[in-house]
């Protein structure tokens, strides 16, 4: 869930490029398949940190109508600007 928080709120409300916590090179499948050594406490801490960052971005947005473009995070142009300011 930390990946979902990171790759929704950061690109949409802050214009950041998509980036991964657990999936090198944005290759998602290995991060779901290689769970034998996964650390639940690390995963929870990462999710909590991303939720806190998302709350900061939402609080800094000028309104709940602020629009962004998740495609900016994938390196594509944005029609809406991408960055909430």
Image (tube, rainbow, N blue to C red):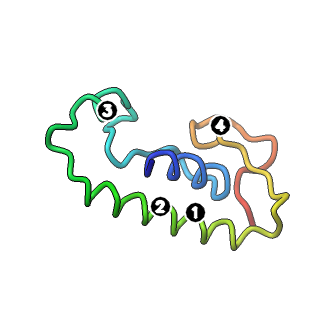
* Among numbered discs 4 and 1, the one appearing first in the sequence: 1
- In the image, what residue occupies the spot 57% across and 36% down? 74
Of marks 2 and 4, the one in the foreground:
2
Q: Mark 4 falls on what kind of element?
A: helix
Q: Secondary structure at mark 2?
A: helix
Q: Are marks 1 and 2 in contact (CB under 8 Å)?
A: yes
Mark 4–mark 1 Cα distance, whole angstroms, equals: 18 Å
The circle on residue 71 is 4
Using the image, tell me which numbered label, if any, was put on residue 32.
3
Looking at marks 2 and 4 on the same chain, the residue that comes earlier in the sequence is marked by 2
Q: Which secondary structure lies at badge 3?
A: helix
Lower position in the chain sequence, tag 3 or tag 2:
3
Separation of disc 1 and disc 3 at Cα? 23 Å
Q: Left or right: where does residue 34 sit relative to residue 68?
A: left
Mark 3, Cα crowd under 10 Å, few <14 / some 14-19 / many 20+, is few
- Residue that mark 1 sits on: 54
Which-is-in-front pick, marks 1 and 3?
Answer: 3
Q: CA distance from mark 4 to mark 3?
A: 24 Å
Which image quarter: residue 10? bottom right
Check contact, mark 4 vs mark 3: CB within 8 A.
no
């Amino acid at each position: 869930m930390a990946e979902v928080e990171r790759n929704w709120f950061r690109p949409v409300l802050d214009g950041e490029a998509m980036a991964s916590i657990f999936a090198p090179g944005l290759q998602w499948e290995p991060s779901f398949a290689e769970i034998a050594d996964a650390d639940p406490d690390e995963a929870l801490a990462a999710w909590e940190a991303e939720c806190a960052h998302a709350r900061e971005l939402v609080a800094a947005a000028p309104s709940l109508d602020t629009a962004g473009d998740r495609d900016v995070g994938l390196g594509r142009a944005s029609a809406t600007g991408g960055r909430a300011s």
